[in-house]
Amino acid sequence: MDYLFKTEPSEYSFADLQRDGVTQWDGVSNPVAVKNLREMKPGARLVIYETGDRKSAVGTASVVSVSASDPKNPVVTIKAGKPLDKPVSLDRIKSSKLFADSPLVRMGRLSVVPLTDAQYKFLIGN
């Protein structure tokens, strides 16, 4: 399973992830997002989406490890990937039939969203 992680760039941007190389993704409180974090496996592919003024998918990452020892606050370690050749705006995502039933457009405040293989490929430009 692939996932999309939303982040507020003024708090932690994709550029910050690239600078750090690896980071822990924690502090998620929404029960659905927490469930998605707990279900992740090392090697899972990620798309990083910046909220705020940007509202675009901007880069890739991957899951290094998952610690769900505290089921209410799982910690996922992720590794930076590459920036997307061209950011994919929320408007473009919403206009794609691939995302018609996606929590990304149906549950706008959800910070960790599962992606189908087709959705992942659409976002990364394949």
Image (cartoon, helix red, strand yellow):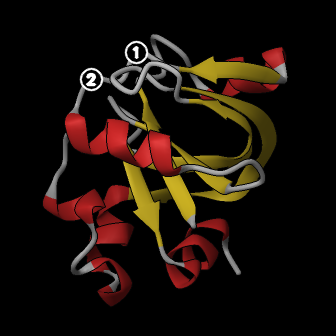
Report the residue that reaches farthest toward the front: 69
Identify the residue at the far bottom of this view: 97
In the depicted view, which residue is nearer to us: 7 or 115?
A: 115
Where residue 79 sits in the image (x, y, percent)? 79, 34
Residue 125 higher or lower than 63, as above or below: below
Decide if residue 15 is on the left or right side of residue 48: right
Q: Residue at x 48, y 22 (%)?
A: 9
Quadrant of res 96: bottom left
Q: Residue shown at 47%/41% (left/top)?
A: 38
The quarter of the rendered structure image containing the N terminus is: bottom right
| Number of other residues with Cα within 10 Å of mark 2, as a class: few under 14, some 14 to 19, many 20 or more | some
Binning the other alpha carbons within 10 Å of mark 1 as few (below 14), some (14 to 19) or many (20 upward) gives few
Can residue 111 be seen at all in this image of the molecule? Answer: no
The reply to whether residue 87 is visible in this rendering is yes
Disc 2, disc 1: CB below 8 Å? yes
Residue beneath label 1, please? 27
Mark 2 = which residue? 29
Farthest residue in the left direction?
106
Q: Helix or strand or loop: what does disc 1 sit on? A: loop
Q: Residue at x 33, y 23 (%)?
A: 72
Give percent across and percent down for residue 50. 46, 36
Q: Amino acid at mark 1?
A: Gly
Q: Position of residue 87 (x, y in %)?
A: 57, 54
Q: Amino acid at mark 2?
A: Ser
Residue occupying image coordinates x 45% and y 12%: 10
**Residue 32 sits in which quadrant?**
top left
